[in-house]
Amino acid sequence: MSELLQFVFSGITVGAVYALVALGFTIIFNASGVVNFAQGEFVMLGGMITVFAHAAGLPLPLAALIAIVVTAAVGVALNRLAIEPARGAPVVSLIIITIGASIFIRGASQLIFDKQIHSFPAFSGDDPIHVLGATILMQSLWVIGGALAVFAGLWLFFTKTLLGRAVLATSNNRMAAQLVGINTKFVMTLSFALSAAIGAFGGVLVTPITLTAYDVGLALALKGFAAAMLGGMGNPKGALVGGLLLGLLEALTAGYLSSQYKDAAAFVIILAVLFFMPQGLFGRKSTDRV
Amino acid sequence: MRKTLITTVPAALIALGLATAAQAVIKIGASVSATGPAAFLGDPEAKTLQMMVDDLNAKGGIKGEKVDLVLYDDGGDANKARTFATRLIEDDGVQAIVGGTTTGTTMAILSAAEDAKVPFVSLAGAIDIVQPVKPYTFKTPHTDRMACQKIFADMQKRGFTKVGLISGTDGFGASMQAQCKDVAGDYGIGIVADETYDPKDADMTAQLTKIKNTAGVQAVLNPGFGQGPAIVTRNYHQLGIELPLYQSHGVASDGFIKLAGAEAAEGVRLPGTALLVADQLPEGDAQKPVVTAYKSAYEAKYNQPVSTFGGYAHDGFALIVDAISRAGSSKPAAIRDALEQTKGFVGTTGIYTMSPEDHLGLDLSAFRMLEVKGGGWTIVN
């Protein structure tokens, strides 16, 4: 029993990390249909900037705030310098641009920061909480709480606010959105800033668990992308459930089957789900008027 | 007659030119991975080589001859390493090569160096580099097989016979996992659990719970590299596993204790080099002067802690310099012969005694068994 509970705790810890990354994908995807492969780099920047600001003597909360603001600015710059000039290009080209941007950010971070692995202290100490013979770290609860908070925030944003609806409208039909008076340029800028800020926020939360270095972004983005696809791209609920599900699948496979097949088993199940439900678990059925 | 003159004169001039070039400076080539995925290995190596050549020339070079270091950064790419090796040999005309940060880049340089008969001292771990012995290839780091042997010898001394393995799936972890399974029997040790993790994984509690619940397991060994072993050590502490935990020489650095946390790392043992415990070596230890000198010079110049990997480059360069001064010649063949006759040469990694059958020249005594106590490394006797 305690064994199963430990596997579940492990899965939730890892799953919440994936979910936070996956949630970052949703806004830009909803605004433009672009899957932003630089999302992992936003997570990395969040962690790395916090590490260096904290090492420079700033208190942790202030360091984290600076990291989130700076990363949001990087997101805006990415939109202004790389995505906007290519407006009108097919979505696939824009996705390729984000891959290029991720390589650029990774290379620049290697020069600006360093090539070492870093971490900063967990928010509430390193002592684990014992539940029925299994253990979980306080920091894992922070990550889970963070993922839930971002999820709730996004859900409110997209369903209850005019701005959120403007983002969805821009995604549906940019021209029509412009005609009804939505400032689509501002919507794009906002979506990149928010996505980057969510990524950086995730980076701040997960770094005490996963540790960070200039090159952690790619692996995080891939797992986060897989989680978002599993749950349904663009849907905050899908990102949350997809991330947790992926983490649980990995931990249970490692625990009961073999750790050698951990990643393989998870991806086989994702493929199976996408085979029967191509939109993911919670994805919108897309219908195109021809 | 006329024809002979035309061909002889340029040939003589070229010969003369080459002769003066060779006498003016000794050229040593290097290709290391100062950037790219192996940068944390190659960066201290490049810095060490640069520091040592500057230092050597400031002291007047080798018997009055200056040394010219031609340093390339292959970024961890084996294709680039091969191109740079060819350029070092054909264009730069170096007399010896040091480098090959990873096993992959080493293998690329190795074939070029062997073909051109230029001595090459590798800085990578794999045993295949010097086994079987290749005439012109040497290496300075001990092998992962030796690390396994050192660890199992320590376990044997403590009376452990059943060991759980948790290994990274990266090249380093996978290779050491295989070597450890191969030599465990020699020490009367059985592997009762064999788990793996991806080097980028964030949590290994599932694998560790499985090992913890394996009947009879007495100690756990984690062959791995980078952040994985730090996370394993944290999770080990989180789960409250009381069994002794052994890490590999791949994480023998102060950075590991910092990442894992002093509390979680307490009691972790691993085979490391003298460099890590420079100030704790007893007076009279043969390596003490060498490691102390290198550590203080490096840390003063670059303001960052010295690493085992930089130590490999230190030894590689020092071995070549030693061979050139003993040979009294900077001809590649003479350097090779002198390298092979290296006896009792004290480096940071260990004391090297090469032979025609052994182009590594280290034994298990080069490793010190270290234990984390109170947030720092101590030597286990």
Image (spheres, helix red, strand yellow):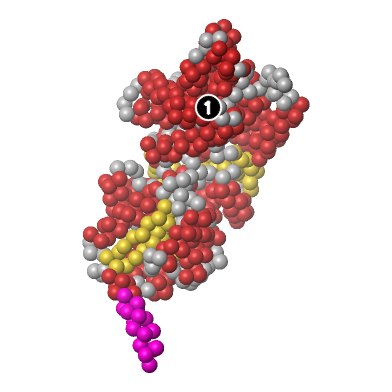
B297 to B377, vertically: above or below: below
* Left/right of residue A212 with respect to residue B201 in the rendered view: left
Residue A131 falls in image quadrant? top right
The structure residue drawn at horizontal position 39% and vertical position 48%, both measured from the top left corner, is: B43
Q: Is residue B186 magenta?
A: no
Q: In front: B43, or B285?
A: B43
- Residue B69 versus residue B153: which sits nearer the camera? B69
Query: How many numbered tags mark residues here?
Result: 1
Whether residue B39 is visible: yes
Crowdedness near tag 1: few (<14), some (14–19) or many (≥20) residues, C-alpha within 10 Å: few
Q: Looking at the image, is B353 positioned above or below residue B3?
A: above
Q: Secondary structure at mark 1?
A: loop
Q: Residue furthest bottom?
A: B1
In this orientation, which residue lies closer to the viewer: B227 or A193? A193
In this picture, residue A41 sits left or right of residue B12: right
Q: In the rendered image, which residue does mark 1 sit on?
A: A87
Residue at 60% from the left image edge and 32% from the top image edge: A92
At a point 37% along the width and 81% down the height, the residue shown is B11
Q: Nearer the viewer, residue A30 or A263?
A: A30
Image coordinates for residue B327, horizontal then vertical, percent: 35, 74
Reply yes or no: does residue B2 show up in magenta: yes
Q: Quadrant of the N terminus of chain B?
A: bottom left
Q: Which residues are magenta?
A: B1-17
Q: Main secondary structure of the magenta part?
A: helix
Position in image of residue A49 (x %, y %): 40, 28
Q: For the residue marked with disc 1, what is the amino acid?
A: Arg
Measuring from the top left, give residue B203's x and y in whole percent: 56, 31
Residue at the spot 39% in from the left edge and 52% down from the top edge: B45
Q: Quadrant of residue B61?
A: bottom left
Question: Mark 1 belongs to which subunit?
Answer: A
Residue B316, percent from left and from top: 39, 60
